[in-house]
Image (cartoon, rainbow, N blue to C red):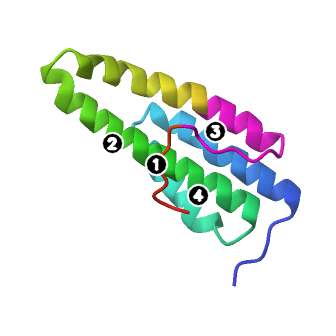
Amino acid sequence: MAVPLRPDEERNIAMLSHLISLVAIVLSASWVSALIFYLIYKDRGPFVRAHTATELNFQITMIIAAIAGAILSIVFIGFIVLIAVPIVMIVLGIIATIKANNGEWYTYPIAIRFVR
Protein backbone atom coordinates (compact mmCIF):
# COMPACT_ATOMS: atom_id res chain seq x y z
CA MET A 1 0.00 0.00 0.00
CA ALA A 2 1.29 3.43 -0.90
CA VAL A 3 2.20 5.72 1.94
CA PRO A 4 0.28 9.04 1.78
CA LEU A 5 2.38 12.09 1.09
CA ARG A 6 2.57 15.10 3.36
CA PRO A 7 0.83 18.21 1.94
CA ASP A 8 4.16 19.85 1.07
CA GLU A 9 5.31 16.66 -0.69
CA GLU A 10 2.05 16.51 -2.64
CA ARG A 11 2.51 20.11 -3.74
CA ASN A 12 6.10 19.46 -4.85
CA ILE A 13 5.23 16.28 -6.76
CA ALA A 14 2.25 17.99 -8.43
CA MET A 15 4.47 20.89 -9.47
CA LEU A 16 7.18 18.53 -10.77
CA SER A 17 4.68 16.57 -12.86
CA HIS A 18 3.84 19.75 -14.79
CA LEU A 19 7.40 21.08 -14.88
CA ILE A 20 8.98 17.87 -16.16
CA SER A 21 6.32 17.64 -18.87
CA LEU A 22 7.32 21.15 -19.95
CA VAL A 23 10.93 20.03 -20.26
CA ALA A 24 9.85 16.84 -22.03
CA ILE A 25 8.08 18.86 -24.74
CA VAL A 26 11.51 19.43 -26.25
CA LEU A 27 11.98 15.67 -26.47
CA SER A 28 8.38 15.08 -27.64
CA ALA A 29 7.91 12.76 -24.67
CA SER A 30 5.79 14.85 -22.32
CA TRP A 31 3.03 12.24 -22.27
CA VAL A 32 5.54 9.66 -21.00
CA SER A 33 6.53 11.74 -18.00
CA ALA A 34 2.87 12.53 -17.29
CA LEU A 35 1.99 8.82 -17.40
CA ILE A 36 4.91 7.88 -15.12
CA PHE A 37 4.00 10.52 -12.53
CA TYR A 38 0.36 9.46 -12.62
CA LEU A 39 1.13 5.76 -12.20
CA ILE A 40 3.62 6.31 -9.37
CA TYR A 41 1.78 8.98 -7.36
CA LYS A 42 -1.96 8.52 -8.07
CA ASP A 43 -2.58 6.74 -4.77
CA ARG A 44 -0.42 8.98 -2.60
CA GLY A 45 -2.86 11.84 -2.02
CA PRO A 46 -5.86 13.59 -3.57
CA PHE A 47 -3.99 16.75 -4.57
CA VAL A 48 -1.19 14.97 -6.39
CA ARG A 49 -3.67 12.56 -8.00
CA ALA A 50 -5.74 15.45 -9.34
CA HIS A 51 -2.69 17.24 -10.76
CA THR A 52 -1.08 14.17 -12.29
CA ALA A 53 -4.41 13.07 -13.81
CA THR A 54 -5.09 16.50 -15.31
CA GLU A 55 -1.52 16.60 -16.66
CA LEU A 56 -1.94 13.18 -18.29
CA ASN A 57 -5.32 14.19 -19.76
CA PHE A 58 -3.81 17.39 -21.14
CA GLN A 59 -0.87 15.57 -22.72
CA ILE A 60 -3.17 13.02 -24.39
CA THR A 61 -5.38 15.85 -25.66
CA MET A 62 -2.35 17.63 -27.11
CA ILE A 63 -1.19 14.43 -28.85
CA ILE A 64 -4.64 14.15 -30.45
CA ALA A 65 -4.49 17.83 -31.48
CA ALA A 66 -1.02 17.36 -32.99
CA ILE A 67 -2.13 14.29 -34.94
CA ALA A 68 -5.20 16.17 -36.17
CA GLY A 69 -2.96 19.08 -37.15
CA ALA A 70 -0.65 16.76 -39.06
CA ILE A 71 -3.59 15.26 -40.93
CA LEU A 72 -5.10 18.69 -41.58
CA SER A 73 -1.80 20.03 -42.87
CA ILE A 74 -3.10 18.96 -46.26
CA VAL A 75 -5.12 22.13 -45.94
CA PHE A 76 -3.62 25.26 -44.42
CA ILE A 77 -5.41 25.01 -41.04
CA GLY A 78 -3.25 22.05 -40.02
CA PHE A 79 -0.10 24.16 -39.98
CA ILE A 80 -1.78 26.64 -37.63
CA VAL A 81 -2.72 23.80 -35.28
CA LEU A 82 0.82 22.39 -35.41
CA ILE A 83 2.21 25.79 -34.43
CA ALA A 84 -0.41 26.38 -31.72
CA VAL A 85 -0.03 23.03 -29.92
CA PRO A 86 3.47 23.58 -28.45
CA ILE A 87 2.67 27.19 -27.58
CA VAL A 88 -0.49 26.13 -25.73
CA MET A 89 1.45 23.34 -24.00
CA ILE A 90 4.10 25.73 -22.75
CA VAL A 91 1.75 28.52 -21.62
CA LEU A 92 -0.75 26.26 -19.86
CA GLY A 93 2.07 24.10 -18.47
CA ILE A 94 3.64 27.14 -16.81
CA ILE A 95 0.28 28.16 -15.35
CA ALA A 96 -0.30 24.63 -14.01
CA THR A 97 3.19 24.49 -12.51
CA ILE A 98 2.66 27.77 -10.67
CA LYS A 99 -0.79 26.71 -9.42
CA ALA A 100 0.57 23.37 -8.14
CA ASN A 101 3.49 25.08 -6.43
CA ASN A 102 1.07 27.46 -4.70
CA GLY A 103 -1.01 24.52 -3.49
CA GLU A 104 -3.96 25.44 -5.73
CA TRP A 105 -6.15 22.94 -7.57
CA TYR A 106 -5.98 23.30 -11.35
CA THR A 107 -7.57 21.68 -14.37
CA TYR A 108 -6.42 22.45 -17.89
CA PRO A 109 -9.25 24.30 -19.64
CA ILE A 110 -8.93 22.39 -22.93
CA ALA A 111 -8.11 18.89 -21.70
CA ILE A 112 -10.41 15.97 -22.45
CA ARG A 113 -10.93 13.89 -19.31
CA PHE A 114 -9.69 10.41 -20.17
CA VAL A 115 -8.30 9.70 -16.69
CA ARG A 116 -10.18 10.70 -13.55
Binning the other alpha carbons within 10 Å of mark 3 as few (below 14), some (14 to 19) or many (20 upward) gives many
Q: In this orientation, which residue lies closer to the viewer: 24 or 4?
A: 4
Amino acid, disc 1: Ile
Binning the other alpha carbons within 10 Å of mark 1 as few (below 14), some (14 to 19) or many (20 upward) gives some
Residue occupying image coordinates x 58% and y 57%:
53
Q: CA distance from mark 4 to mark 1?
A: 18 Å
| Residue 3 found in image quarter | bottom right
Say whether disc 4 or disc 1 marks the residue closer to the N-terminus. 4
Q: Which residues are magenta?
A: 93-109
Which residue is the site of mark 4? 37
Say whether disc 4 or disc 2 marks the residue closer to the N-terminus. 4
Amino acid, disc 2: Ile
> Horizontal and vertical percent for residue 65?
34, 36
Mark 3 and mark 4 residues within 8 Å of each other at the beta carbon = no
Using the image, tell me which numbered label, if any, was put on residue 19.
Answer: 3
Mark 1 and mark 2 residues within 8 Å of each other at the beta carbon = yes
Mark 4 and mark 2 residues within 8 Å of each other at the beta carbon = no
Amino acid, disc 3: Leu
Say whether disc 3 or disc 4 marks the residue closer to the N-terminus. 3
